[in-house]
Amino acid sequence: MEERNQTERNKAVIRRFVAEVQNGKDFDVYDELNDPDFVNLSSPPGVPPDRESGKLFLQAFAQAYPDATFTVDDMIAEGDQVVTKKTMSGINTGDFAGVPATGRRVTFQYVDIMRVRDGRIVQHWNIIDQLSWLTQLGVIPAPSSVDTGTSAG
């Protein structure tokens, strides 16, 4: 019973992170929910995997997509890990990660895996549908066809 209660508490931490940090852009709550020893195991190249860099990255994203909304589509938890499949939707009105603002609305999915200890996030892994994201921004061309390796006729 205690393990189930802990799992539910961990899920509540992640729900709060989504609601208050990602959607509410409250970065004081980011500091509250992320342990000082937080490690982002999916930091982009050149971005240190620590708590402060994670916050700066999210703040830059929030400036580039000020109307961004994050929706938890699925949440699975076991032990100290909480996995979410999320959808992000927003209009790109600012530069981000070297990509100039496009003014385009994007919607993409991603998966987060968070490890929670004593009510704080201590580790993070992330997988994003970058092909869809960059295609919607117009940064890369949309695939015009899929080569299946077979020829007609």
Image: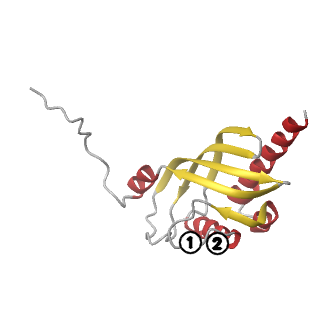
Residue indicated by mark 1: 47
The answer to the question of whether label 2 and label 1 lie on touching residues, with beta carbons closer than 8 A, is yes
* Residue 21: percent from left, percent from top: 72, 59
In the shown orientation, is residue 120 left or right of residue 153? right
> Among all residues in the image, which is located at the extreme left?
153
Q: Amino acid at mark 2?
A: Ser
Q: Amino acid at mark 1?
A: Val
* Residue 23: percent from left, percent from top: 69, 56
Residue indicated by mark 2: 53
**What is the spatial separation of the Cα atoms under label 2 and label 1, in whole angstroms?**
7 Å
Q: Which image quarter holds the N terminus?
A: top right
Q: Nearer the viewer, residue 13 or 81?
A: 81
In the shown orientation, is residue 121 left or right of residue 3? left
| Residue drawn at the location 52% of the way across and 65% of the way down | 44
Tag 2 secondary structure: helix
Instruction: Rate crowding at label 1 as few (under 14), some (14 to 19) or many (20 or more) other CA atoms within 10 Å.
Output: few
Q: Which image quarter holds the C terminus?
A: top left
* Residue 97: percent from left, percent from top: 49, 70
Q: Nearer the viewer, residue 37 or 28?
A: 37
Say which quarter of the image contains residue 41: bottom right
| Residue drawn at the location 57% of the way across and 59% of the way down | 42
Name which of mark 2 and mark 1 comes first in the sequence: 1
Tag 1 secondary structure: loop
* Residue 74: percent from left, percent from top: 65, 37
